[in-house]
Image (cartoon, rainbow, N blue to C red):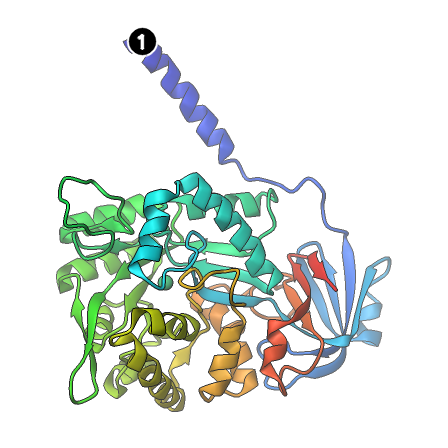
């Protein structure tokens, strides 16, 4: 028995290593594609350009410019004529949950973790990756699987290998919170229930958890900085901080040591302050953002991902402080905009059902909250790419990935046009064309 195991082990190991060999698409994209764009918003420039040609070679953009200029290099190129449309870079949603189908209430959350297998949830996640792509989101940062372990990395693999259509995925696997500070919790101590996160305690535990998650494919590390949100009479949104400063610093330090950035769920001012003390790279939700915290974000180049769509979606069902949090955040958003905080588009889709609200609604909220349409577009393209540390995403520029969307009207006049994409290309492959 023992020797059989010893024999079996190296075989299993070699199979799993073979499975990790770099995948390659079997049918290469046409060598050259020439996209004619009636109007181009390139994600970086402050003004649109008219009558532009985009030359694509394989999965990347080779040239962008006036048709006459680009045409010389486009011999034999297949032409995609988007002359009547406005072309933009593929959108980027920096806060998603592929493995979640809406959790406005504790019950809706528990049902998914208790009554759905991880394989079933992964099937829905694969569908969600396609929904994101069809809504024009060619890239997402998926901020934890809510009890589905490392299934986000599997979905990412299937997308990268061309097995399923989907957005590019930056995965963060399980996320972290200390013991007892994240659902599911139950009065029945006889039950061992699934955890929505990896429970992490102590400095050594924090470092080990980061190493485990990175070993299983985490591109980002996420932890929950706070819980239990409440307003004080001075209109400050407070919260209970989850980790000790030493624990939070250990998470961030170990992640950075391993070349991973850190996202902190931080809703109340106390949770945001603790996350900033720990040195995180992005603040998620940030409803309780105060002026002095905004100054720290600006000084340190920390990004704020406000996830307005989910905040408004869960406010009614959750009640309590969640309802006034919406208006509180709107006012903070306006002040942060004036202070020059880097506000990056993230929706928290999965907190609301993927099938119910188009993620691009978030652009609309940002304009309602005071951004110009161009600012909102950059927030969900080039600035999001900057947050991800991926300069070849989020812009229509030579060398970047050929991730394009096109809309009918002028999104600078009506931002809701982004909720009706007519064309989606990712890496030179067309996924939607209407
Ligand atoms: Zn989230």
> Can residue 215 be seen from the camera position used here?
no
Q: Nearer the viewer, residue 275 or 256?
A: 275
Q: Is residue 194 left or right of residue 201?
A: right
At which x and y percent is residue 288?
26, 79
85 relative to 231 in the view: left or right:
right
Q: Position of residue 88 (x, y in %)?
A: 64, 73
Residue 136 shows up from this direction: yes
The residue that label 1 is drawn on is 3
- x 16%, y 48%: residue: 204
Q: Quadrant of residue 238?
A: bottom left
- Residue 109: x, y in percent? 33, 55
Looking at the picture, tell me which residue is in the foreground, 107 or 157: 107
**Tally of numbered tags:** 1
Quadrant for ligand 1 reads bottom left
Quadrant (top left/top right/bottom left/bottom right) for the C terminus: bottom right
Under circle 1, the secondary element is: helix
62 relative to 19, above or below = below
Left or right of 110: which side holds 85?
right
Q: Residue at position x 45%, y 25% from top?
A: 14
Residue located at (29% from left, 44% from top): 212
In the rendered image, the vertical position of residue 99 relative to residue 137, given as above or below: above
Q: Position of residue 415 (x, y in %)?
A: 59, 81
Quadrant, the N terminus:
top left
């Amino acid at each position: 028995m023992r020797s059989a195991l010893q024999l079996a082990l190296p075989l299993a190991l070699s199979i799993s290593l073979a499975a990790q060999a770099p995948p390659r698409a079997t049918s290469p994209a046409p060598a050259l594609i020439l996209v004619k764009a009636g109007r181009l918003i390139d994600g970086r420039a402050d003004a649109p350009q008219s009558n532009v040609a985009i030359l694509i070679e394989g999965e990347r953009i080779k040239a962008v410019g006036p048709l006459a200029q680009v045409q010389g290099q486009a011999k034999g190129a297949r032409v995609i004529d988007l002359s009547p449309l406005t072309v933009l870079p593929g959108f980027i949603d920096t806060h998603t949950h592929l493995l979640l189908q809406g959790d406005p209430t504790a019950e809706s959350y528990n049902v998914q973790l208790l009554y759905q297998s991880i394989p079933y949830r992964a099937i829905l996640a694969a569908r969600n990756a396609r929904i994101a792509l069809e809504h024009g989101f060619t890239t997402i940062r998926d901020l934890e699987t809510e009890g589905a372990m490392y299934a986000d990395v599997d979905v990412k693999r299937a997308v990268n290998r061309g097995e399923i259509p989907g957005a590019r995925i930056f995965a963060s696997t399980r996320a972290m919170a200390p013991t007892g500070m994240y659902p599911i919790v139950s009065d029945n101590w006889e039950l061992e229930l699934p955890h929505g996160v990896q429970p992490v305690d102590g400095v050594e535990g924090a470092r080990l958890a980061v190493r485990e998650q990175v070993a299983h494919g985490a591109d980002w590390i996420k932890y929950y900085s706070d819980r239990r949100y409440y307003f004080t009479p001075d209109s400050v949104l407070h919260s209970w901080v989850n980790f000790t400063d030493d624990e939070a610093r250990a998470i961030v330090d170990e992640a950075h040591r391993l070349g991973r950035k850190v996202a902190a769920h931080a809703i109340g001012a106390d949770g945001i302050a603790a996350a900033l003390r720990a040195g995180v790279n992005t603040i998620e939700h940030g409803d309780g953002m105060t002026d002095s915290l905004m100054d720290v974000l600006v000084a340190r180049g920390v990004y704020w991902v406000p996830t307005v769509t989910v905040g408004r979606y869960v406010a009614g069902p959750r009640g309590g402080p969640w309802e006034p949090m919406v208006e509180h955040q709107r006012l903070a958003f306006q002040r942060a905009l004036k202070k020059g905080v880097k506000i990056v588009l993230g929706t928290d889709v999965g907190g609301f059902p993927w099938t119910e609200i188009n993620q691009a609604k978030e652009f609309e909220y940002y304009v309602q909250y005071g951004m110009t349409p161009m600012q909102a577009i950059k927030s969900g393209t080039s600035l999001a790419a900057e947050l991800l540390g991926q300069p070849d995403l989020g812009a229509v520029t030579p060398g970047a990935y050929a991730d394009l969307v096109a809309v009918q009207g002028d999104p600078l006049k009506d931002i809701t046009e982004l909720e009706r994409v007519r064309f989606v290309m990712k890496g030179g492959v067309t996924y939607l064309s209407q």
